[in-house]
Image: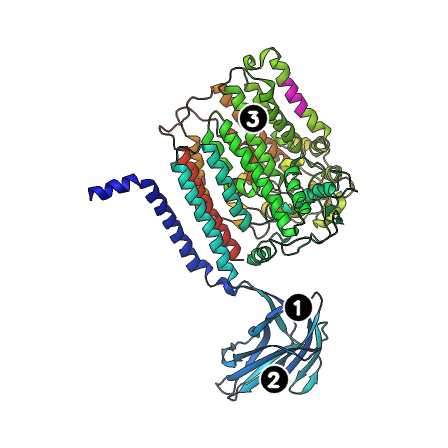
Amino acid sequence: MEKFLTQCKRHRRLLGGAAILLAAFFAFACVWLTQVRGNGEKSRSWMINDQFSEFALIEDTVTQDFVCDRDLLHMGFAFRVQKAGDEGPAGVLELTLTDLDTGEVLATSQGDMSNILDTTEAYYTTLGLSQPVELTEAGQRHYRVTLTAHYTGEGRLLIGYTPQPNQAGLGLTVNGQTVEGMLAILGVYAQIGGFLTKFYWVIALLALILIGAGWWMFTSKKVPLHRMVFCLVLGLGLLFNMVLPPYAAPDEQFHINQSFTLASTIYDPHLPVAQSHIHSTLRRPSDVDPIVQDAETNVFTWQHIAKNLFTTNHDPFTATHDFDEYQVDSSYTMYWVSALGVLAGFLLRLGFVPTLFLGRLTNLVFFAFLSAWAVKKAPVAKGVFATVALLPMTLHLAVSYSRDSNLLALTFLFTALVLDLAFGPKETLTWKQLIVPALAGLLIVPSKVVYFPLMALVFLIPAVRLGRWSKAIKGGFVGLCLLAFLLGSGGQVLLGSFFSGTPETTASSQAAEPAGEAAEAASATASQPAESAAASADSAPAQAAETAESAPAAQEQAAPQPSTPEADSICYTLPYILSHPLDTFQLVIRSVVEYGDHYVKSLIGGSLSYFDPGVETAWTWVALLLCVLLLAWMQPAQWELPVAAKTLCLLAALACCGLAVLGCVSWTPTYYTTIYGLQGRYFLPVLPLLLLARPASFTLKQDCTRGLVFSTLLLDVCVVANVFLVILAR
């Protein structure tokens, strides 16, 4: 026994990893057994004809000629039962589907009539086909479906039809007699089948590999924390990318348009690079896929993407097409990374789907690299930076086309580098050490001015480290950031949003010519707020484009009364706020009371994207992730930040949060009862900074940062599984 215990102690790392993997596999197996298995019958259908006001008695045979432009896997008909005494119809109902033009029998089916429900109202009963009938080419195909009843009793079957003409109907015959009208027919054109189980276990296998790798890095003292973060961000990002594919992130369709347009201007030699196309989008002519471009991901989205993941493009080389789709911004600063991935897809002649994923993956790699760099350079609170980088909402944005992917990476890196310059080991700084944080700041501010207060962190750097030009360097940096913002379109938007008092003019300044068109596309007025009201004050002319996607969610949040253009044009601009402070205060309080849980969930990742229906994860995971954040906040450090430094960090973070809220408030019409479109994810860029302000007494005695990172990995895997089940339930 003693020898056995000795061996267990010697191999505890291996045994511990095996136990965790076994528990994780058991959990995945239980989920598959109870939730996933049995969903292979999920199908997609459409009504070839959904009208039936009359019922025909099937004595012998019913024949319907019709046209169809989709595949047929099953066919459904509206039946009603006619009893003989207590006896319903019994026998076999035979179906034959033939090609009307050639007479070829395409599929058959037989069903037991006793399985048809006896109800007062007619319901569709689906009959399977012996083999799927697929379209061999685009267009319509002519069919003849024949239903033949072979009765064994006195009961009879009736079938619903409409006597009115129908475009799909080519002729109806009931018991040998020609009848005006068409049968009510439901066509099933897709079924998920065994793909669902295969896809689920691919996700589970990747998650198990990631858990195993995470355990090895957690227990190995040779793998530094920043490399562990880099690997976990990449691995978890891939899982989120598979479960929530392109177009699933907030307003991602407009961000995709932005990246594809930028890539197209480089790809097509006849177009000027980075030319603003706010009112339209440039892509290759065949870069269109209605299933993938539907933001409401479902199991058939996964199946379709899997089938098209390795397609190639056959458009003429360098050919682009102008699509009537809006973009986000007149500035392409935050889209160069993803655009380079898209451009690589163009040059490799990849199809639309693989090119979409390639652009997403370049954003993920960029975020993983910068966030790991931030963890490495942060002189304090490394656990905070690591944990925030691994939150589900952070990962969801990091692997999307959203400009927040690059923005989060840059804000994390800027914060860590400036803290390193201020409190790191080097006593004297060289100009080379100032280049990267300066570039990061000059990229952040023009993109979203609400994070301008972050630039105040440079005043933490001691003058002795910068030398005799300390004040000039700090003041010059802040001045350059301000100038970079004012030279962009965001400066005009900021002034117009807060002082014009007419959001309609703000929208027009944002979207230049197409502002009104964007509003019409969103079925809203030009004065409606944009996706990121926090960014409305800063970024760009096409916030009106973002209105199109975000309006439904924000409207659902605010639950206003029916609006008019006149009412929408009166918003909480700065003059209105100053003259109505009580109304503004009540607006903020009501928002916190009614939607405080939404703000927390959309900060952590309990509410991923916000289209209707959205992807909501259980509060259990959100609560556990909050506990991990709390523990990361309380981790001990080799030394404590000075009180003055903590105060400045807290004030800068609160100022950023306040500007984000103020931006949303400024877009809120005065008849709204809560703030329009505010989400917790707007506070993610400054969350590490907020968590730096910790009283020295709130400190744990033992450092367990690596354990917290591994715990976050496990919780992220649970969130991925939760998201999978949410989408499965659609």
Q: Which type of secondary structure does the marked residue at label 3 adopt? A: helix
Q: Which badge, 2 or 1, comes first in the chain's sequence?
A: 2
Q: Which badge, 1 or 3, comes first in the chain's sequence?
A: 1
Name the residue: 54% across, 76% down: 120
Q: Position of residue 685 (x, y in %)?
A: 56, 33
Q: Amino acid at mark 1?
A: Leu
Task: Please determine whether, in this image, residue 665 is positioned above or below residue 75.
Answer: above
Q: Amino acid at mark 3?
A: Ala
Task: Please determine whether, in this image, residue 189 is positioned above or below residue 410.
Answer: below
Quadrant, the C terminus? bottom right
Name the residue: 43% across, 41% down: 214
Cα separation, mark 2 vs mark 1, equals 32 Å
Q: Amino acid at mark 2?
A: Leu
Q: Is residue 365 toward the left or the right of residue 273 in the image?
A: left
Give the label on residue 135, or none.
1
Give the label on residue 57, or none.
2
Crowdedness near tag 1: few (<14), some (14–19) or many (≥20) residues, C-alpha within 10 Å: some
Residue 186 visible from this viewpoint: yes
Q: Position of residue 600 (x, y in %)?
A: 51, 40
Q: Identify the magenta region.
A: 474-481
Cα separation, mark 2 vs mark 3, equals 77 Å
Q: Which type of secondary structure does the marked residue at label 1 adopt? A: loop
Crowdedness near tag 2: few (<14), some (14–19) or many (≥20) residues, C-alpha within 10 Å: some
Was residue 118 drawn as part of the magenta stretch in this picture? Answer: no
Helix, strand or loop: magenta stretch: helix
Observer-nearest residue: 487 or 508? Answer: 487
